[in-house]
Amino acid sequence: MALQVRNISFDFDAVPVLKNVSFSAPEGKLTVLLGRNGSGKSTLLKVMAGILRPKSGSITVFGREVTALSGSSRAELIGYLPQFHRTVFPFTVEDVVLTGRAAYVFSTPSRADRERARSAIAAAGIEHLRTRPYTELSGGERQLVMVARVLAQDPRVILLDEPVSHLDLANQQHLLGMLKNIVARGVTALAVLHDPNAAMLYADEIVFLRDGEVVAPPDGVPPWNPFFIQEIYGVRTEALPWRGKALVVPVNGL
């Protein structure tokens, strides 16, 4: 397993947000976190990234404890795409992506650093934006730039918080397909998504959170089971079979 989460608890202002969360993310796979708003998904991702320190428990990445890593060592192992990001300076897209190489740059970026940044820009499909000021881009375009920035970092594990939230349908499919290509090359990815159907179609593993706790379907029950989905989201659904998987369709209002 690339990433091991063991009995993680986290409180915010003495209010429990995560409660003894445990799961594993296999190497070279896409694992998706699903759950209702406020279930603790984004907080858990920040704890895994080393941004928040847990109240108890441990997180290891390839056997190394995250809280014991230096900033540069953590950057070489873990890339993190936050849910919200903001840049006030009109840097070009290439310069923004190049900042993903910060852990490897000691004075000025090398030719190899710039080549890695341009390769990440190409992988994200935004070569046409390379010289544009970041501040002039749309929300969806900025999101793709931030994905490229994480790719330029060249980490072994990528954590993404709602990476498709500002993207149109075409770019959602592009980004999720890109993640599948990345994990096929051996990188481990873990993403928070809102859409269960995107998870059902693209994820190798799904971890469900409810009120800060991991909840799994009973043995032999698929994750799209209507009774299980209702337990997680509180809504009635039907599962429509599709290519050995299923799409989740809400019943209310139909």
Image: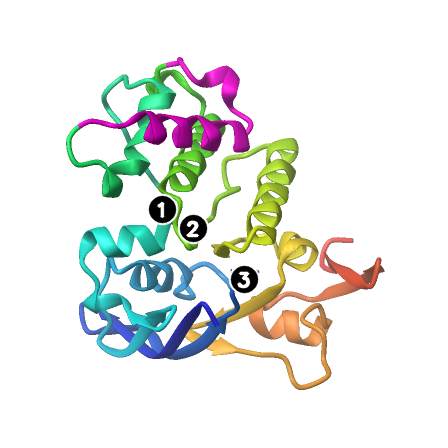
**Separation of marks 1 and 3 at Cα, in angstroms:** 17 Å
Circle 3 crowding by C-alpha within 10 Å: few under 14, some 14–19, many from 20:
many
Establish if 94 lies above or below 212: above
Establish if 185 lies above or below 236: above
Predominant SS of the magenta segment: helix
**Separation of marks 3 and 2 at Cα, in angstroms:** 12 Å
- Considering the numbered disc 3 on the image, is that residue within a helix, a strand or a loop? strand
3 or 2: tag closer to the N-terminus: 3
Which residue type carries mark 1? Answer: Pro
Front residue of 36/158: it is 158
Cβ atoms under marks 1 and 2 closer than 8 Å: yes
Q: Which residues are magenta?
A: 108-132
Q: Which mark is residue 82?
A: 1
Circle 1 crowding by C-alpha within 10 Å: few under 14, some 14–19, many from 20:
some
Establish if 183 lies above or below 10: above
Image coordinates of residue 2 in percent, x first then y, are 45, 67
Which residue type carries mark 3? Answer: Thr
Image coordinates of residue 150 in percent, x first then y, are 39, 41
Image coordinates of residue 11 in percent, x first then y, are 24, 72
Q: Which image quarter: residue 236?
A: bottom right
Q: Which residue is mark 3?
A: 31
Image coordinates of residue 207 in percent, x first then y, are 53, 69
Image position of 217 (left or right of 115) = right
Q: Which residue is mark 2?
A: 161
Residue drawn at 36 percent across, 42 percent down: 153
